[in-house]
Image: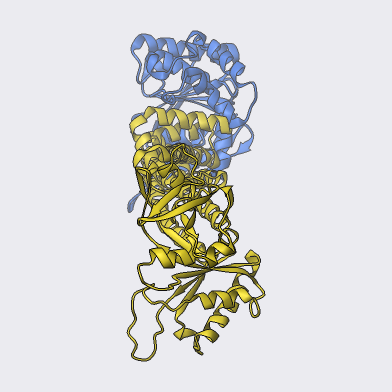
Amino acid sequence: MIGLEAVTKTYRMGKVEVQALRGVDLHVDSGDFVAIMGASGSGKSTLMNIIGCLDVPTSGRYLLDGTDVAKLDDDHLAVIRNRKIGFVFQSFNLIPRTTALHNVEMPLIYAGIPNRRSRALEALEAVGLANRAGHQPTELSGGQQQRAAIARALVNNPAILLADEPTGNLDSASSVEIMKLLAELNQQQARTIVLITHERDIAAFANRVVELRDGLILSDERRAA
Amino acid sequence: MNLFEALRVAFAGLLANRLRSSLTMLGILIGVAAVILLVAVDNGAGVQINNQIQALGANVIFVYPSNARGSGGVSQGFGTSQTLTMADVDAINSRQQDPDVVAAIPIAQSGGQITFANQNYFAPTTGTTVDFPQVRDYQIAEGSFFTQDDVASQHRVAVIGQTVVTNLFGTTDPVGQTIKINRQSFRVIGVFAAKGGSGLGSQDNVVVAPITAVWAYLSGGRGKNVSQIVASASSAGTVTQAETEITAILLQRHQISDVALADFQIQSQQDILTQASSIATALTLVLGAIAGISLVVGGIGIMNIMLVTVTERTREIGIRKAIGARWRDVLTQFLIEAMFLSGLGGALGIALGAALAYEAPHIPAIASSSFPPPVVSIPSVLLAFGVSVGIGLFFGIYPANRAARLHPIEALRHE
C-alpha cells in the first residue's frame, strides 16, 4: 500500500541545510494501523507530509497504492491527495462558516463526483454525527469537529487515513472516543491508518509503532493482537 | 469546483465581512452609477437636439449681417451692422442662381410689450413676409396667415403663437381681437399650432406681423432693417449647396470678391445643432473619463481587499489544497469572488445611476430649467455591467493566482 525506499528530505533554511529525513524505508500494508512516534525534530512531521503527498522527497522512492508519487507536479499531487489520502489534523481544520455536511462534501466537489449529499451524509452517519450535519464548526464541540473531519477524510474512500496528532487538541474523554472510532474503522472496515503522535497511550491503539529519531527509524514494533 | 459552489463560497465570504464588502463595492458602484448617469444625460441631450431639428426644420439656413473686416477696419459687435436688405431677399427668392433654395424670408425683430384688455406679456415680434410658415414650418391652428396684400399695404395684422395665447387671452378666442404691441394696435388674424421644443428659445412664444408694418410702426425710425434672412433648402441633403449658392449671390450683390471679407455670416440649423451636440458629446467624454478613473480606483480597491482576503484565508486555502483542490480550483474560486464583488457593485451602480436618471426630471430645480430628461440606454447598462465584471476579473487575477500558488504545508501552518 505504502512503500518508502531510502527516502531523504533536505530543507534549506537560509544558508544552512537541514536534513529532516536521512533515508527512511517504511512499508505499510493494506488494513494496517501504524503509529509513528518521535520527539519534535525527529522528522515525523516531514515524514507525514511526504506520506500525505503534501511534499515530495529529495531522493528515494515513494510508492502509494502502486503509483510512484515522488516526482509528480503540484496538480497531480492534489489529485492523489483527493483520491487516495484522507487527512485528519490536530486542529480539525474544518472550513469556517460552512456546515459539517458541506465540509464533508468538499473532497467530492474537487473530485467532481455526483450524489455528493447522500455520500456525505453516509460518511457523517459512519462517525455518528448525522444529527449535526447542518451545524457550522463553531457550533460543534472539539470531539464533534474531529468526527466531522474524519468523515471528510473518509468520504472519498481513500487508500489511507493519515491522522496527525488527532487528539492533540482534545480532552482525554474525547481523545479516547476519537481513538476508539479510528480503531473501529481499522478493524471493521479494514481502513489503513497512519497515526502521528508523541503520546504513548494514544499510540497504544495502533497495531504497530514506528519510532523516529533524527530522521531515521529507531524502532519498528508490531504489537501482538 | 463548480460555479454554484464558488458563488456560494463567495457570497458567504462577503456576508462574513459585510462592512468591508460594502465599502469595496462602493468604489465600483459610484463609478458605474456616474457612467450610467452621464451616458443617460448625453442620450437625453441627443434626443432633445433631434427633436429641435424636427421642430426648427432641418433645411433651414440663417444669414446674419456681420462686419466687413477691411484693412484697418474696426470690427464691431455681432448684429450691429445693417448689411442685409429686402433686395437681397428678393434676389435669393428669384431663384435664378440658387435652384436649391425653396424660399427666403426677411426677419425684422422688434421686442416689445404686448397688451390685451388688462393683460400684458412680453414676446418678440417678428416682421416677415408671407413665406414665413413654409420656411419655418409653422402650421396655422386657427384663422389664417397674412397675405401679400397685407405686406404691400402695411396692414397692422398679427399671427400669434400658443404661449402668447395662453398668457394674454386665457379662454377668450384671440382671432379677431385687437392687441397692442408697443402701444400700436394690431389685429390678431391667426394662431399658430403648438410646435413644442424648448431650450434654444421657445418656438411658441412668437408674434408675427408683416415686415412692412413692423418697419412702419415698431422699428422706431431705424429704417428698413433686415436683421436676418432665413431661407429653406429643398431638402436636408441640399443644405450645403444652398448655403454656397446664397453666399455667391450675396457676395456678388455686395460687390465683395473675398469670402473672408464678407459682410454677412451664413449658418444652417444643422451647423448649429451639430456644434451643440458635439460640445455635449465632448463634455460627456471628459466626464466619462473621470468616472472611468473612479472605476479603475474601485478596481484597485477590489485588488487590495482580495489580497487581504487571501492572507486571511491562507489556512482555508491550505485545507482546500490538502483535500485535493488544484491550482485552477483555487484560482477560479477567488476570481469568481472578485468578479462577484465587482459585478454586484456594478449592478447596484446601474440601479443607482438609472434611479437618478429617472428621478432627475422630478427634482424641482432641474424640472424648471431646460435640462433635457436623461434617457438610460440598454447597451450602456449591459456594457457597464460587463466592464464591472471585467474589472473584477482583471484586478482579481493577481490575488487569485497568489492564493492558488500557496504551498499547502505553509498555508496549513499559517495562523
Q: Is residue B395 visible?
A: no
Q: Position of residue A176 (x, y in %)?
A: 40, 10
Q: Quadrant where the N terminus of chain B lies?
A: top right
Q: Colour of chain B?
A: yellow
Residue found at x 51% / y 12%:
A127
Q: In the picture shown, does residue B298 fall above or below B254?
A: above
Q: Quadrant where the C terminus of chain B lies?
A: top left
Q: Is residue B260 visible?
A: yes
Q: Position of residue A198 (x, y in %)?
A: 36, 24
Q: In the picture shown, does residue B158 fall above or below A57?
A: below
Q: In the picture shown, does residue B24 fall above or below B108?
A: above
Q: In the picture shown, does residue B323 fall above or below A183?
A: below
Colour convention of the picture: by chain
The foreground one among B411 and B259 is B259
The foreground one among B278 and B195 is B195
The chain coloured blue in the image = A
- Side of B13 where B153 appears, left or right: right
Q: Position of residue B363 (x, y in %)?
A: 37, 38
